[in-house]
Image (spheres, coloured by chain):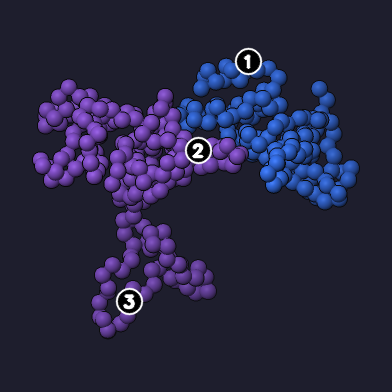
Chain colours: A purple, B blue
Amino acid sequence: MSIGLIGRKVGMTQVFAEDGTMVPVSVLTVEPNTVTEIRTTERDGYVAVQLGAGTARRLTKPRLGQLGDLPRVKDVREFRLEDAGEYEVGQTLDVSLFSAGDEVDVTGVTKGKGFQGTIKRWGMRRGPETHGSDSHRQPGSIGAGTDPGRVMKGQKMSGHMGDVRRTIKRLTVVRTDPERNLLLIRGSVPGARNALLLVRKA
Amino acid sequence: MTLYFAVVWACGPGLPAVSDLQARVSTPVTVLDDVIADQIRTDLPQLASGDTVRVFARVVEGNRERIQVFEGTVMRLRGGGIQRSITVRSIRSGVGVERTFKVNSPRIEKIEVVRHGVARRAQLYFLRKRVGKAATLRERRA
């Protein structure tokens, strides 16, 4: 695992690359993150850096106590590392952690799609729409007959789709903008606008 | 973004098309506009459907670059902001050729308006069915 930053999704647009090709990009705002805690093997059993981002209007008393003089951060996430020696509590990390061309993994919660059928949820094929067919969007067979006499575990069926944590690996950083705290990443990232995202070095 | 507009207005000749401005006004003021603001070109003439234009596009051949000129009628304008594109139609050695250019692309050296044509619709697809003189448009009078 490696260090990353907490950011938020702004939306998508396109930019021109130097050779004139258009590149689809996701725009993320990454306000400077504060290191709020260092996890160590001796005390916590694992090594990680805890980062905080945003400004909270209200905080729980335990969090207030932990932060002390540090900024009142809203979102706190941990990044597990091999060695956290170069980080210390109170330090700030910003977009300049990345540079154009870097590969990153982006983690976030995908858009919730509600209760969906098997076609949208699993990409199954639909039945005929006409010629007397009633099985337009039916799931079809869910298994064999008397033997095994049950439905196998993990059978793909309709149900709730989306609103799950997903990581998109090895996306390319197109541009960083330390002045406006922006990060442009090629391709799409999980979640709706304003969704919390973790950007980690791949 | 307000500031950006002020700059655009002050440019005088070389203003983006009125429809360009409208397309930008209708979008909410967001960070996304700022991200692309520096890539939107303000040095291009006002373009409209029916205009005859000369597009100077940079083309890479092997390992050298040259400028290719394509002249024809603007058949349609498409998209807003950085995605804005034009489709230019012309007859090349008896064959109808249509090329689409991303107007804001850095690969476009410049665009010249040769002639303003009268177009009563936004998309001039009817030109595809016309040959010879029938495919020409009346010149717009100033």
Q: Do labels 1 and 3 share a chain?
A: no
Q: Which of A169 and B61 is in front in this view?
A: B61
Q: Are marks 3 and 2 on the same chain?
A: yes
Q: Name the residue under label 1.
A: B10
Chain letter of mark 2 equals: A
Three-letter code for the amino acid on which mark 3 is drawn: Gly
Numbered disc 3: secondary structure? loop
**Label 1 – label 3 distance at C-alpha:** 70 Å
Q: Look at the picture and state if A129 lies above or below A57.
A: below
Q: Do the residues labelled 1 and 3 touch (CB within 8 Å)?
A: no
Q: Which of marks 3 and 2 is in front?
A: 2
The quadrant holding residue B13 is top right
Res A13 label: 2
Three-letter code for the amino acid on which mark 1 is drawn: Ala
Q: Do labels 2 and 1 share a chain?
A: no
Numbered disc 1: secondary structure? helix
Q: Does residue B25 appear left or right of residue A36 in this picture? A: right
